[in-house]
């Protein structure tokens, strides 16, 4: 694998690559009603960090696969993520008017069409994934991450936590489901693209995913508390305004920042037995904690 490339070059190449894969998968007006197709494309294209596809590509490199082998899996994870953001922004959830610096899908296309766009993106993800090698197992991994024991269940816990005070243990469980499960799936799907990973590699990747996924969310909470809407591309301060439980409200700002650093060290340590082949995953852990949006 091309570990000689600077991380900025590698990540930019992969971000451009996944943009093309997503563009090709998304429907245009024709068989799909024009308004629905436009809403789906609005929700997916033209922005975003593409962290989950980057993790899929990085994990695929660990097992000796090339980028083409990981394309559809990386796209499927991003489609599920995009659908979750569309639904998360709806008035019945977080009711946010801004996403990636643009009007949220329901603001641009109406609540009903946004709801359908999210549903359609989820279907598109599983349809694309099912047609690739190892499709049944890949669909099982992604369904587990998106379903009641993963993202959907975590979202319910998040809704419940608005009314009920929760402690760090409960918040950690919530975010391991809501955010961490899909990050873990992105890595597992990438690791399924090439040779079978060893028991040690599988264990290391799982430990890395747990730490990196949680670190991502703690940073997200800090950015919501300290960032601006212009820098984030979404409405800043929403968590506090809605009385949501976050790592900042539970731990305080200073302790939340220390928690990020501890999780970063944990993620890095998990990769140590994997050596140079895990370079991109290690760099992504650095990127997660250093990001400003």
Image (cartoon, grey):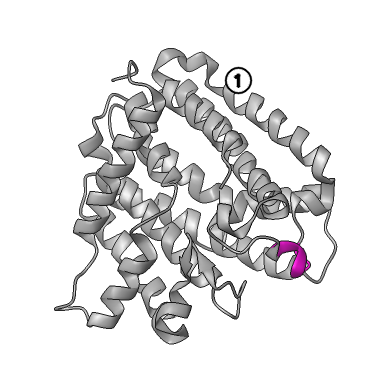
| Magenta span | 239-244
Question: Pointer 1: what residue?
Answer: 269
Toward the left, the furthest residue is 30
Asked if residue 251 lies left or right of residue 41, the reply is: right
Judged from the image, the secondary structure of the residue bearing numbered disc 1 is: helix
Q: Quadrant of residue 71?
A: top left
Asked if residue 179 lies left or right of residue 45, the reply is: right
Q: Depth check: 227 or 275 in front?
A: 227
Asked if residue 153 lies left or right of residue 159, the reply is: left
Q: Which x, y percent locates residue 265? A: 65, 24
Q: Depth check: 38 or 137 in front?
A: 38
Specify the quadrant that holds the N terminus: top left
**Residue in view at x 70 percent, y 47 percent:** 222
Q: Which x, y percent locates residue 119? A: 39, 73
Toward the front, the furthest residue is 230
Judge whether 153 appears above or below 197 on screen.
below
Q: Is residue 243 magenta?
A: yes
**Residue in view at x 65 percent, y 26 percent:** 266
Q: Depth check: 114 or 166 in front?
A: 114
Q: Which x, y percent locates residue 105? A: 44, 74
């Amino acid at each position: 694998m091309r570990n000689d490339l600077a991380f900025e070059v590698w990540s930019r190449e992969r971000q451009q690559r996944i943009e093309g894969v997503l563009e090709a998968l998304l429907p245009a007006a024709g068989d799909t009603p024009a308004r629905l197709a436009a809403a789906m494309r609005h929700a997916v294209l033209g922005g975003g960090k593409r962290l989950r596809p980057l993790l899929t590509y990085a994990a695929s490199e660990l097992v000796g696969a090339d980028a083409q082998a990981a394309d559809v899996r990386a796209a499927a994870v991003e489609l599920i993520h995009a659908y979750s953001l569309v639904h998360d922004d709806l008035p019945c959830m977080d009711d946010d008017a801004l996403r990636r610096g643009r009007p949220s899908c329901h603001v641009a296309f109406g609540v009903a069409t946004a709801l359908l766009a999210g549903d359609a993106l989820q279907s598109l993800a599983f349809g694309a994934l099912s047609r690739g090698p190892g499709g049944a197992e890949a669909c099982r991994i992604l369904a587990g991450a998106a379903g009641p024991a993963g993202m959907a269940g975590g979202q319910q816990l998040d809704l419940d936590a608005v009314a009920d005070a929760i402690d760090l243990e409960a918040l950690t469980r919530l975010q391991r489901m809501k955010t961490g499960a899909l990050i873990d799936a992105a890595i597992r799907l990438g690791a399924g693209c090439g040779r079978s990973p060893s028991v040690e590699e599988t264990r290391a990747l799982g430990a890395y995913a747990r730490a990196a996924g949680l670190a991502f969310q703690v940073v997200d909470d800090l950015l919501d508390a300290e960032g601006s809407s212009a820098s984030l591309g979404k409405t800043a301060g929403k968590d506090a305004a809605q009385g949501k439980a976050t790592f900042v409200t539970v731990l305080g700002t200073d302790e939340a920042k220390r928690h990020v650093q501890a999780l970063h060290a944990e993620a890095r340590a998990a990769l140590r037995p994997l050596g140079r082949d895990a370079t991109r995953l290690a760099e992504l852990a650095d990127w997660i904690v250093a990001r400003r949006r």
